[in-house]
Amino acid sequence: MSIVIEKPLNKLIIFLATGFYAGYLPYVPGTIGSLIGVGVFFIISSLPPVYYLLVLFLLFSLGVYLSDRAEALFAKKDSTHIIFDEIVGLPVAMVLIPNGSGWIAAGFILFRFFDILKPYPIRNIEEKFNGGFGIMLDDVAAGIYANILLQVVRLYVG
């Protein structure tokens, strides 16, 4: 696999799309991306909900661009090196969820479960949409599934 990264912008795209090069780790790059997503959650968790959602929208939009460009640079559909989607997907799972270690652990586990299993319609999203939009959207969907379960638990646990 050859990558054309001699241009500074291409270097920046690869740096960000791979989660500061963590996507190059040989084992569980998606899980590492999700852990970086926990850090993003910590940073934005104190924002009012409307700003939290705005930041997620901006990160999603940036992720579509980065993932689309990185996929072209890697010359491989949804390369495992691209982990920006997991970085954004985890905070999606945590929308309106308390910032506590138990909630974060549950959100992390549920997000990884849905991201790996890809139940209907997540797998269809991945197959239907190409490029950066498809790369990002399936992880957002996994985050939404995880969030729904967390909200149900939150409703009953308090």
Image (spheres, rainbow, N blue to C red):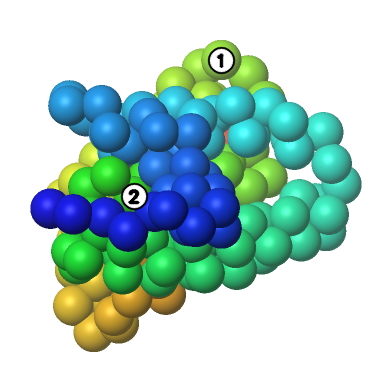
For discs 2 and 1, the disc positioned in front in the rendered view: 2
- Mark 1 nearby-residue class (10 Å; few <14, some 14–19, many ≥20): few
How far across and how far down the image is residue 120, in percent?
A: 20, 69
* Residue at mark 1: 101
Determine the secondary structure under disc 1: helix
- Residue 22: assigned label: none
Q: Nearer the viewer, residue 120 or 136?
A: 136
- Residue 82: assigned label: 2
Q: Residue furthest left?
A: 1
Q: Nearer the viewer, residue 2 or 95?
A: 2
How far across and how far down the image is residue 98, in percent?
A: 67, 30
Eyeballing the image, is 55 above or below 73? Answer: above
- Mark 2 nearby-residue class (10 Å; few <14, some 14–19, many ≥20): many
Which residue is pictured at 83% across the width and 54% down the height?
A: 51
How far across and how far down the image is residue 22, in percent?
A: 37, 30
- Amino acid on which disc 1 is placed: Ser
Q: Residue furthest bottom?
A: 128
Q: Is residue 116 left or right of residue 90?
A: left
- One can see residue 88 in this view: no
Which residue is pictured at 87% across the width and 47% down the height?
A: 48
Which residue is pictured at 32% across the width and 59% down the height?
A: 4
Where residue 141 sits, quadrant-wise, is: bottom left
Eyeballing the image, is 44 above or below 60? Answer: above
Q: Is residue 115 left or right of residue 94?
A: left
Q: Residue furthest top?
A: 101
Eyeballing the image, is 131 above or below 54? Answer: below
- One can see residue 74 in this view: yes
- Amino acid on which disc 2 is placed: Ile
> What number of labels is visible?
2
In the rendered image, which quarter contains the C terminus? top right
The answer to which of marks 2 and 1 sits earlier in the sequence is 2
